[in-house]
Amino acid sequence: RLPALASVGRYSYGMYVLHMFFAIFAATWLRRLTAPFGSARMLACAIFMIALSYAAGFLSYHLLEKHFLRLSHRRFAAGAAHTYKEKP
């Protein structure tokens, strides 16, 4: 197992949902910020967007998703116990 890939998988939903906001940000502001990089500008933008998306996915997972996932597991586990009773 590769822990780095596992963490990307864990945070991928937040990365997917939030990446478009960063693409819009990149289109307007990153051009100015990456001007000193010259010909490597696109590479610098891509690396910055990936890092920003990963950070946003990390925050999204730990501040929101993890808690809702815990609630859903509790709710469905409790509902399953009452719904599927074995017949004698």
Image (spheres, helix red, strand yellow):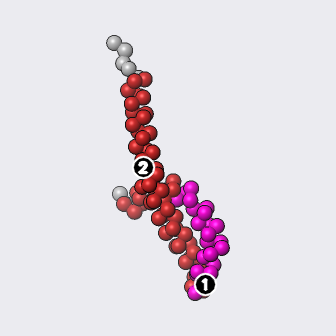
x, y percentage for residue 36? 58, 87
Q: Main SS type for the magenta part?
A: helix
Span shown in magenta: 15-36
Among the 4 quarters of the image, the one containing residue 76: top left
Secondary structure beneath dot 2 equals helix
- Name the amino acid, label 2: Lys
Please check the rendered image and state whether residue 62 is part of the magenta-colored stretch, yes or no: no
15 relative to 41, above or below = above
Give whichever of 6, 81 is nearer the camera: 81
27 relative to 76, above or below = below
Residue behind mark 1: 35
Residue behind mark 2: 66
Secondary structure beneath dot 1 equals helix
Q: Residue at x 65, y 73 (%)?
A: 28
x, y percentage for residue 29? 62, 75
29 relative to 80, above or below = below
x, y percentage for residue 45? 57, 75
Determine the CA span between mark 2 and mark 1.
Answer: 38 Å
